[in-house]
Image: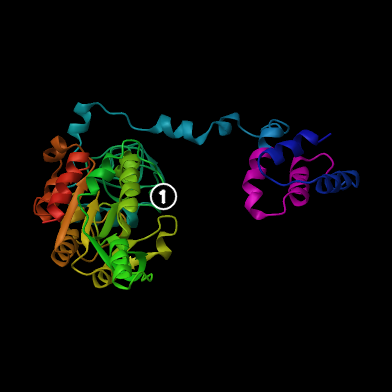
Amino acid sequence: MLAHFILALRAAGIPASITEYLTLLRGMKQGVAEYSVDDFYHLSRATLVKDERHLDRFDRVFGEVFKGLEPPEGDPVRQIPEEWLRKLAEKLLTEEERKAIEALGGFDALMETLRQRLREQKGRHQGGSKWIGTAGTSPFGAYGYNPEGVRIGQEESRNRRAVKVWDKREFRDLDGDIEIGTRNMKLALRRLRRFARQGAATELDLPDTIRATANNAGSLDLKLVPERRNAVKVLLLLDIGGSMDDHVRLCSELFSAVRSEFKHLEHYYFHNCPYERLWKDNRRRRDTEVPTWQVLRTYGPDWKLILVGDASMSPYEIREPGGSVEHWNEEPGTVWMRRLTDHFRRSAWLNPVQEGMWDFTMSIRMMQTLMEERMFPLTVDGIEAMTRELSR
């Protein structure tokens, strides 16, 4: 009777055996689940799922196999998917209407007004220009439009105008196993190499062995030397999330190329601009955060610093305390950028945005100045120019 259900579970990777199937049938025979879909759901889940990792997968299969068994209750309007309603509520404005909407007048004014709204607001609002709400022109909320605002309750960026994001954000690590078809990035990075023999002597030195054996009247005299390796040490800081989502593939290719070319490589992530903390793993970000001061103490001035990011952000994130889009930073991004560039003798920034567009974004110009014009496009030619700069 339920064989198709068991087969669907097994096809989804849930190891439901014949024994568990018979247990489910005995439970139904004893009247544990008679005429209720909910009772049958809980009985089948208890008998067929033995690992909590499979619970979500079981729910999806159950919904697919028994979809429509129980009629929807209540107002049919409630069955409209939430995503549809959200799309209907989004504010669509012409370019003229957008230009007519004015910003509050700076970061401090924005933060002070948000404090006032939080004290005064008592309920939900939609479509307005003042309160925290949705689908309006207010600086605070989601699915609307304002030249400068605080994004609250919206999963992803739409207009890229937010100067703060009041949500928990989840980013993924860059894939270090992606193969680059043309290998151009690897070839460009090979300019940044300086070979040296360091460590234990594990490699046969054939010319010296022949010479020593001949001098030893033919008795074999092996000569070993340390392995010849690239001695260049690279610290890679990668911008992740937000507008960088448009460049994930390109940055993953770069990350893969760098990992294959440099034995001495360490990497950390940041968002938009480096502040007081960096992190190693985006999925466990809070557990892998490292103070930037610790990074500066760990890696000496002889390491090559490469920052990768589009530098496309609110100018407040660079020049203002508290300007970070995600948290309240006590010191502005300019302070941390100067500490990084002062500590590392050789540093550069790779930008995936087309170089011809840099002058149209204020934050890119600001970051280019902080890097003392050592910003290069994330292209093969740009990587070659960066390696020449770092090799000087």
Task: Say which residue appears at 30% left-offset and 70% top-offset.
Answer: 212
Residue type at mark 1?
Answer: Arg
Q: Please tell me whether residue 63 is drawn above or below residue 372 in the rendered image.
A: above
Q: On the picture, is 11 further left or further right than 153?
A: right
Which residue does the numbered mark 1 point to in the structure image? 172
Task: Say which residue appears at 17% left-offset and 50% top-offset.
Answer: 387
Q: On the picture, is 286 further left or further right than 71?
A: left
Q: Please tell me whether residue 158 is drawn above or below residue 387 in the rendered image.
A: above
Q: Is residue 297 magenta?
A: no
Q: Please tell me whether residue 231 is drawn above or below residue 153 in the rendered image.
A: below
Answer with the quarter of the image where residue 310 lies: top left
Q: Give how far across and how far down residue 69 sits, in percent.
A: 73, 32
Q: On the picture, is 29 further left or further right than 303?
A: right
Instruction: Look at the image and give the residue range highlighted in magenta.
Output: 33-62
Task: Give the structural element (helix, strand or loop) at label 1.
Answer: loop
Task: Say which residue appears at 71% left-offset and 41% top-offset.
Answer: 10
User: For the C terminus, which image quadrant?
Assistant: bottom left
Q: Please tell me whether residue 384 is drawn above or below residue 220 in the rendered image.
A: above
Q: Give how far across and how far down residue 120 sits, in percent.
A: 33, 54
User: For the N terminus, which image quadrant?
Assistant: top right
Name the residue nearer the viewer: 69 or 71. 69
Q: Is the stretch drawn in magenta largely helix, strand or loop?
A: helix
Task: Say which residue appears at 91% left-offset and 47% top-offset.
Answer: 30
Q: Is residue 59 magenta?
A: yes
